[in-house]
Image (tube, helix red, strand yellow):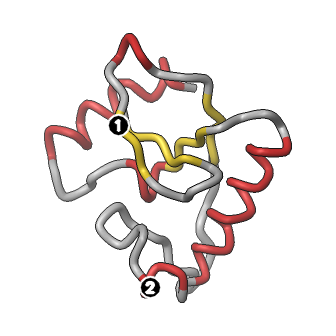
């Protein structure tokens, strides 16, 4: 499982038995808002997208609420990998 470190805004991978407590950003996108995807995270172009504001806000909130990590579907899941995407969809109930 990939989680976003709320302080450093970098992704970290965890094995099933090592997953720390984490917050979840559950959200919807409206209109032309650009979401930040996994390959873009950490690039200068990601920070130019409107969706990055939502990521920053969610990370700040997670920190205020005592969480070091956050899971955000748009940037923690490799949607180009069908196996990973399928495993994520099947695991979401457990993660929530």
Q: Quadrant of the N terminus?
A: top left
Identified at 71% across, 55% down, the residue is: 58
- Depth check, front residue: 84 or 57: 57
User: Furthest residue to the top?
Assistant: 17
Identified at 79% across, 34% down, the residue is: 66
Identified at 33% across, 26% down, the residue is: 90
Counting other residues with Cα less than 10 Å from the Cα at mark 2, is it few (<14), some (14-19), or many (20 or more)?
A: few
Residue at numbered disc 1? 13
Q: Disc 2 or 1, which lies upstream in sequence? A: 1
The secondary structure type at the circle numbered 2 is helix
Residue at numbered disc 2? 44
Residue 7, percent from left and from top: 64, 53
For the residues bearing labels 2 and 1, Cβ distance under 8 angstroms? no
- Depth check, front residue: 18 or 50: 18
Image side of residue 87 versus residue 74, left or right: left
Residue 44, percent from left and from top: 44, 85
User: Furthest residue to the front?
Assistant: 8
The secondary structure type at the circle numbered 1 is strand
């Amino acid at each position: 499982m990939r989680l976003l470190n709320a302080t450093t805004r970098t992704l970290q991978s965890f094995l099933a038995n090592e997953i720390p407590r984490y917050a979840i950003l559950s959200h919807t996108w409206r209109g032309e808002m650009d979401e930040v995807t996994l390959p873009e995270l950490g690039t200068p172009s990601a920070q130019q997208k409107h969706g990055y504001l939502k990521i920053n806000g969610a990370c700040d909130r997670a920190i205020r609420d005592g969480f070091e990590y956050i899971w955000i579907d748009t940037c923690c899941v490799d949607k180009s990998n069908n196996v990973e995407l399928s495993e994520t969809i099947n695991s979401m109930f457990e993660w929530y």
